[in-house]
Image: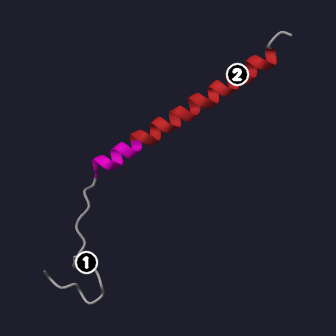
Amino acid sequence: MPERPPDGRVFGMPTHRTARPRRSPVRLTGRAVTLGLALGVLAGAGWVAGMIYTLITWPL
């Protein structure tokens, strides 16, 4: 079994950074989820506003 580095890490870390891809599927998925949540919030706010309007204008 290889020995641990002197600083206690389990494995050695690379000494250089790798290039990041410009567009990753994770980022595109995150944007789609954010857009879906934003549309859901807008739909919910519209529904609540409609319910309040209905209760205010309900004939007694």
Q: Which residues are magenta?
A: 23-31
Q: Eyeballing the image, is 8 above or below 59?
A: below
Residue at the limit of the structure toward the left, as seen here? 1
Mark 2 and mark 1: Cα distance apart in space: 58 Å
Residue type at mark 1: give it. Val
Residue at the limit of the structure toward the front, as seen here? 1
x%, y% of residue 11?
22, 77
Q: Main secondary structure of the magenta part?
A: helix
Residue at 23% in and 65% down: 19
x%, y% of residue 53?
74, 20
Q: Residue 10 — which label?
A: 1
Label 1: which secondary element: loop
Residue at 63% in and 31% down: 45
* Rendered-image quadrant of the N terminus: bottom left
Residue at the disc numbered 2: 51
x%, y% of residue 54?
74, 17
Q: Quadrant of residue 57?
A: top right
